[in-house]
Image (spheres, rainbow, N blue to C red):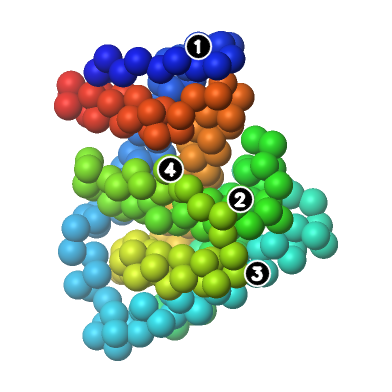
């Protein structure tokens, strides 16, 4: 790991470096599961979008934007109506929606996107709550949304953008709507890979369930990383940007050692 010096106002227990290493392990494990799954299914992350029909690729951006706009509000409303489920129960639910989507081919897979996105976004809000942040607060809602800006589990790029970890802003409804529009094109690429993977011949519903398990696990772990760093910064009085640089050094230092 590179030598980055932090001067926390309050000492961390366990030490900051130990907590950073634990969060980095979550990050690496989360990114690995999607690629391993695709290897098992006999597909490759690169070029999956080429397997989608032309009409699907053309409509994916609009479908993703609608799914994200719907899910952002639906997830918050559902948390007021029912308690948060366990991580495993959430994964089981999205496995069910993925199986239903994969069973009916592309049309049902596309229709499944808003529901699965809602369940995942609600899970992210629940993880924010676990770390002591109010999911109804605009800043926290924005950070939940920003988690989707991380590369999806099918991404193979080791230079993954970590900017979603450095959110700084007092957000408003207009800002949140702008964020949704900004994030949706990037998410569309990730979800396009997901749709293409669900269309692997023969496996159908099984593929949909497995892919959704991978995606749900990934974004749950990314939420733990994001809110874990935020909590560590607030508890110790450390600069969050410095913590992210320490995290980045741990991630890419380990990757370069492979």
**Which x, y percent locates residue 237?**
55, 24
Disc 1: which residue: 15
Mark 2 or mark 3, which is nearer the start of the sequence?
3
Label 4, label 3: how many angstroms apart (C-alpha)? 22 Å
| Left or right: residue 77 compared with residue 54 | right
Q: Can residue 210 be seen in this view?
A: no
Disc 3: which residue: 73
Label 3, label 2: how many angstroms apart (C-alpha)? 14 Å
Verify CB contact (< 8 Å) between mark 3 and mark 1: no
Q: Which mark is residue 165?
A: 4
On screen, residue 1 above or below 64:
above
Q: Could you tell me which quadrant the N terminus lies in?
A: top left
The residue drawn where x is 24% and y is 69% is 49
How crowded pointer 3 is (Cα within 10 Å; few <14, some 14-19, many 20+) is rated as: few
In this view, which residue lies farthest toward the right? 81
The residue drawn where x is 56% and y is 11% is 11
Mark 2 or mark 4, which is nearer the start of the sequence?
2
């Amino acid at each position: 790991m590179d030598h980055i010096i932090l001067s926390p106002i309050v000492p961390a227990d366990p030490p900051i470096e130990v907590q950073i290493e634990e969060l980095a392990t979550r990050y690496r494990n989360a990114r690995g599961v999607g690629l391993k799954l695709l290897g098992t299914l006999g597909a490759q992350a690169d070029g999956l979008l080429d397997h989608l029909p032309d009409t699907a690729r053309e409509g994916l951006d609009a479908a993703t934007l609608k799914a994200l706009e719907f899910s952002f509000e639906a997830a918050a409303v559902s948390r007021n109506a029912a308690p948060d489920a366990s991580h495993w129960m959430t994964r089981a639910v999205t496995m069910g929606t993925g199986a239903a989507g994969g069973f009916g081919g592309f049309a049902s897979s596309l229709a499944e996107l808003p529901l699965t996105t809602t369940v995942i976004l609600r899970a992210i809000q629940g993880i924010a709550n676990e770390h002591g942040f109010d999911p109804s607060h605009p800043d926290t809602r924005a950070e939940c949304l920003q988690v989707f800006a991380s590369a999806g589990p099918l991404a193979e790029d080791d230079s993954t953008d970590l900017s979603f970890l450095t959110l700084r802003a007092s957000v408003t409804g207009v800002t949140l709507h702008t964020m949704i529009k900004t994030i949706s094109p990037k998410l569309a690429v990730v979800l396009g890979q997901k749709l293409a993977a669900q269309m692997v011949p023969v496996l159908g519903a099984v593929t949909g369930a497995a892919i959704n398990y991978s995606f749900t696990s990934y974004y749950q772990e990314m939420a733990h990383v994001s809110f874990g760093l935020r909590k560590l910064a607030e508890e110790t009085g450390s600069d969050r940007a410095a913590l992210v640089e320490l995290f980045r050094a741990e991630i890419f230092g380990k990757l370069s050692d492979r």
